[in-house]
Image (spheres, grey):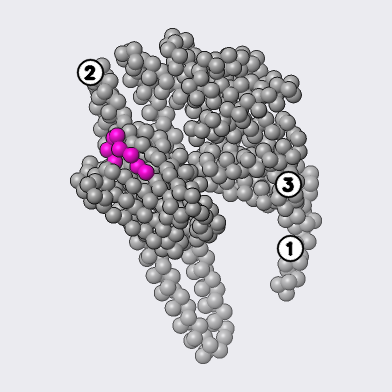
Amino acid sequence: MRRILSFIIVCLTLCSFSIDKVEAVLERAYAAEDSQRFEEAIGIYEQALAMLPEDSVVWISDINSSLLICHVRLGQIQKGLACGEVSLRLDEQMGDKERISSSLNNLSSALITAGRLALAESYLQRSIAIERERKADDKLAVRLGMLAELYTKMERPDKALPMAKEALELDEKGGREAKAAIRMSQYGSALVSTKRSAEALPYLRRALTLHRKYENFTSEAITLATLGIAENALHHPAEAEGYLNQCVELSQRIGVVQPLMTAHMELSRIYDAMGDHRAYGHLLEYNALKDSIASVQVQQQISDLEVKYETKEKEQELRHKEVLIQRQRILDAVLGIMLLLVLAVVVGLVKMLRLKNQNMALKDRLMQIVSHDLKNPAIAHQKALHVLSKSVGVLSTDEVRTMTQSMAEDADAHVNLLYSLLDWAGLQTGRLRYTPVTLTLVAACEEVIAQHRAQATIKGVTLTITADDADHTVVADRQMVEAMVRNLLSNAIKFSPAGCEVRVTIEGVTVMIIDNGVGLGAESTEKGTGLGLNLVRKLADINKATFSITKNEGCGTTAVLKF
């Protein structure tokens, strides 16, 4: 009977499927996406997916690619990455190299937003290899330009320059003037990062002219910010101020954040060097934008946690309904069988209640940590802002710099704590699953270090990484390895005073994180949650690794992970 019903349902589904209906739904989704109504677009795309049979591989891949873009624009990075992976997997099944390259490019963009730069680099290199093989110069120029921007972000300008130059030459050769303007901006940015600002100016000025010609406002704002940095590096503060103020006005008008943040920070540096009180105002604007971005990320991560717990509760509710149905069937059975089944139901209910109590205790523990460890830095942040707002014109530049540095460190503490909370909750709920892959410890450590350079720079701590000539390949869960290194590196930076060095040394399959700060357990102004080291120990056990931490002679600590 069940087989007959299943066959009828499949037939009805196939009969109800209509290409015209799907195309009409997708037209509404495209319109919503073009109007930047991304939440509405996501709902319509998911509706279209539900209408498609499983063998509509091309459409399913295209819709997931669009979902990737919409989720990323809403800050839902993990959901976007999941959709991008589905699109890439389907394109690889079809063997369509053009589609594979496009999926790799889209995933790279999302990974850059998520801060996973090493994996983004790997995907971009695969995409570039495909476009070189296809001899598709227009697509190749786009991929090379994105990789140049990535290398600039990773502070590897020696690699960024040749990529940006080749991309520019390809677009100029192909007569793609608007695209060539973007490549000029990328090449100019790479030159500025190598302290060759004078060489960068002609490219940046030409790019600015073309951006305005084609009304590419976002690229215009980015180029204005880069021009301001270049002119300031050449000790032309008036010219730099003009470009940066134009960038602020344009960015506010079109609603782009990153170039606006860059302009405010550079204007703060210019005015600070001049002893102008406007430096403080631009620094406050920069911090406000930074805090707003951090707030969105915090809300998204907390939302992810809530989704996990809501899912858990829904699963319990479904199990409870199944028990009630089973009990109704038992009433029609023989008395002896009914008694046995009733006993089984009672045992099941006891287990469910115990599981529910454990989940409630887990929630209580999570809320205790959130209320205690997120509250204290937030209060300190609030007090510092009140002091700044009441003391404008009174505090010296050094005092303002000290206070803003302290607020930046509080913000870093918030983000690091949220990472620990997410990993901890994943372990407790069973959502963080052990998925071993073959990986290189050097690449994993470099990616984590790239994420912490800004935190170290703000505190005045130097990060270095060294590796011997041995094989550093291990079989472990990449996400868990990065979580362990992230917690240990964050602790090392946190407990190291300004001027100190934190070294990451890799010898074979052993990772050592060495600092010469006050040391764990020693007298320090820094405070931790207690989650970090416990999380590292648990993750090390799961990955069959050993973890130890010792106090160095004199000062500092050495944390060792051996796989």
Binning the other alpha carbons within 10 Å of mark 2 as few (below 14), some (14 to 19) or many (20 upward) gives few
Towards the viewer: 519 or 331:
519
Give the x, y percent position of residue 40: 60, 40
Q: Residues within 10 Å of mark 3 (few under 14, many from 20)?
A: some
Q: Nearer the viewer, mark 1 or mark 2?
A: 2
Amino acid type of the residue that numbered disc 1 sits on in the rendered structure: Ile
Q: Mark 3 or mark 2, which is nearer to you?
A: 2
Callout in the foreground (3, 1): 3
Q: Earlier in the sequence, mark 3 or mark 1?
A: 1
> Secondary structure under badge 1?
helix
Q: How far apart in space, not on screen, are marks 3 and 1 (Cα)?
A: 22 Å
Q: Is residue 476 magenta?
A: no
Left or right: 186 with respect to 556?
right
Residue range in magenta is: 495-503
Task: Tell me, yes or no, if residue 302 can be seen here.
Answer: no
Most foreground residue, 249 or 528? 528
Residue bearing mark 2: 394
Residue occupying image coordinates x 37% and y 46%: 489
Prevailing secondary structure class for the magenta stretch in the rendered image: loop
Question: Who comes first in sequence, dot 3 or dot 2?
Answer: 3
- Residue 504's place in the image compared with 178, above or below, is below
Q: Point out residue 418 in the picture as x, y percentages from the top left corner.
A: 39, 46
Give left or right: position of 401 versus 328.
left
Looking at the picture, which amino acid does disc 3 mark?
Trp
Q: Secondary structure at mark 2?
A: loop
| Residue at position x 44%, y 78% in the image | 347
